[in-house]
Image (cartoon, rainbow, N blue to C red):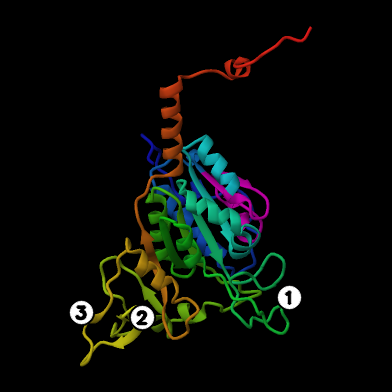
């Protein structure tokens, strides 16, 4: 999507006059800042952007973007966004949600948005906790998580957002981290450019109720060994010396040291269009022995729902002709009551 003769925007043009009401130090600030930096360069009039959210800390996002927006009800942002997109396909529609809003009460709506493949962009802020309601465990909290609602440790096995998205048939699945600002900008831009539903999980620190949840992936001393930066067509290597890699032993991933026994040629090469590779990568999450994949796991082209809908409507008109609501009401058996 691009407009003709779009004015030159700056970050200030996408910053609203509302006071930002997140806790000092919250990762949401970084996400907001990167969105406000990226959107001026997308070549679209800001009146053509719509941000839609549900309930949660992340869902305050529409207030802070100087675009059209709608703060809806808990878990129902995908349903509202679908209606907005189908009624006006030229709009660039963005859903901002959290791991609780989008995967718990709104899980069913998220699943069906992804499988339908409307041209909508989803940004799911994942802090692995309920922040707005003061620190209960969420659908992505790890087993054993001690919170106010699980004082002896959570027994729930966590949802893996990327695996869930892939299971729905999503056509674009990616992940970034709040502190990796340049990478986040690139992922937001890629999400916008994807035709179909894009699903971007953003690891986001809640410094009040779940501080340091992603510390190993953001600390300078450890992140080289705990993050697998994905690049399409490039071998999956990591470590400070880039001397460790992911290799397949049959269908099982394993970590190898690149040197005497294993070479770079033995390392698995990333392919964004390969569903099996994407599934393998998504399942590395919550496995402490493996680095967490960050980047685009999966991206393919597929017809969007709105394209298929318009094709269906046009075919029906071609076969049956166009008509009016009044003609439909008057069709068939009618009678006059006197």
In the current view of this chain or complex, which residue is farthest to the front?
A: 333
Q: Within the image, what quadrant is residue 3 found in? A: top left
Q: Nearer the viewer, residue 107 or 94?
A: 107
Residue 85, image x, y percentages: 51, 41
| Label placed on residue 149 | 1
Residue 227 visible in this rendered orientation of the protein = yes
Q: Badge 2: how crowded within 10 Å, few (<14), some, or many (20+)?
A: some
Q: How far is the residue under mark 1 from the one under mark 3?
A: 48 Å
Where does the magenta region start and end?
A: 50-78
In the current view of this chain or complex, which residue is farthest to the right?
A: 338
Residue 200, image x, y percentages: 47, 60
Q: Within the image, what quadrant is residue 155 found in? A: bottom right
Which callout, 2 or 3, points at the residue further toward the start of the chain?
Answer: 2
Per the image, label 2 sits on a secondary structure element best described as strand
Residues under numbered marks 2 and 3 in contact, where contact means CB atoms less than 8 Å apart = no
Q: Badge 1: how crowded within 10 Å, few (<14), some, or many (20+)?
A: some
| Label placed on residue 304 | none
According to the picture, the residue beneath numbered tag 2 turns out to be 253
Q: Badge 3: how crowded within 10 Å, few (<14), some, or many (20+)?
A: few
Q: How far is the residue under mark 2 from the one under mark 1?
A: 35 Å
| Label placed on residue 265 | 3
Q: Quadrant of the C terminus?
A: top right
Residues under numbered marks 2 and 1 in contact, where contact means CB atoms less than 8 Å apart = no
Q: Is residue 92 above or below residue 277?
A: above
Which callout, 2 or 1, points at the residue further toward the start of the chain?
Answer: 1
Q: Is residue 302 magenta?
A: no
The residue under the point 38% across, 55% down is 190
In the current view of this chain or complex, which residue is farthest to the top?
A: 338
Per the image, label 1 sits on a secondary structure element best described as loop
């Amino acid at each position: 999507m691009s407009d003709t003769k779009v004015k030159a925007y700056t970050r200030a043009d996408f910053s609203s006059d509302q006071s930002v009401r997140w806790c000092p130090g919250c990762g949401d600030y970084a996400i907001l800042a990167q969105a406000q930096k990226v959107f001026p360069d997308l070549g679209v009039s800001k009146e053509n952007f719509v941000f839609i959210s549900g309930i949660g800390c992340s869902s305050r996002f529409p207030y802070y973007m100087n675009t059209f927006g709608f703060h809806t009800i808990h878990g129902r942002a995908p349903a509202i966004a679908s209606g907005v997109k189908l009624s006006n396909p030229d709009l660039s529609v963005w859903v901002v949600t959290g791991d609780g809003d989008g995967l718990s009460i709104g899980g069913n709506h998220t699943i069906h948005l992804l499988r339908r493949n409307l041209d909508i962009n989803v940004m799911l802020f994942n802090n692995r906790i309920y922040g707005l309601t003061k620190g209960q465990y969420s659908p992505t909290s790890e087993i054993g998580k001690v919170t106010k609602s699980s004082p002896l440790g959570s027994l729930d096995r966590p949802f893996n957002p990327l695996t869930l998205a892939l299971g729905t048939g999503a056509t674009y699945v990616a992940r970034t981290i709040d502190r990796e600002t340049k990478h986040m900008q690139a992922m937001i831009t890629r999400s916008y450019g994807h035709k179909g539903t894009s699903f971007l999980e953003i690891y986001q620190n809640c410094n009040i109720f779940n501080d340091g949840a992603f510390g190993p992936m953001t600390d300078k001393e450890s992140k080289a060994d705990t993050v697998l930066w994905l690049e399409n067509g490039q071998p999956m290597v990591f470590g400070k010396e880039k001397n460790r890699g992911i290799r397949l032993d049959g269908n099982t991933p394993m970590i190898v040291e690149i040197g005497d026994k294993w070479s770079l040629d033995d390392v698995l090469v990333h392919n964004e269009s390969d569903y099996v590779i994407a599934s393998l990568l998504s399942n590395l999450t919550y496995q402490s022995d493996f680095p967490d994949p960050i980047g685009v796991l999966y991206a393919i082209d597929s017809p969007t729902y709105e394209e298929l809908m318009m094709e269906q409507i046009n075919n029906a008109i071609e076969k049956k002709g166009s008509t009016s609501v009044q003609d439909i009401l008057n069709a068939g058996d009618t009678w006059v009551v006197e």
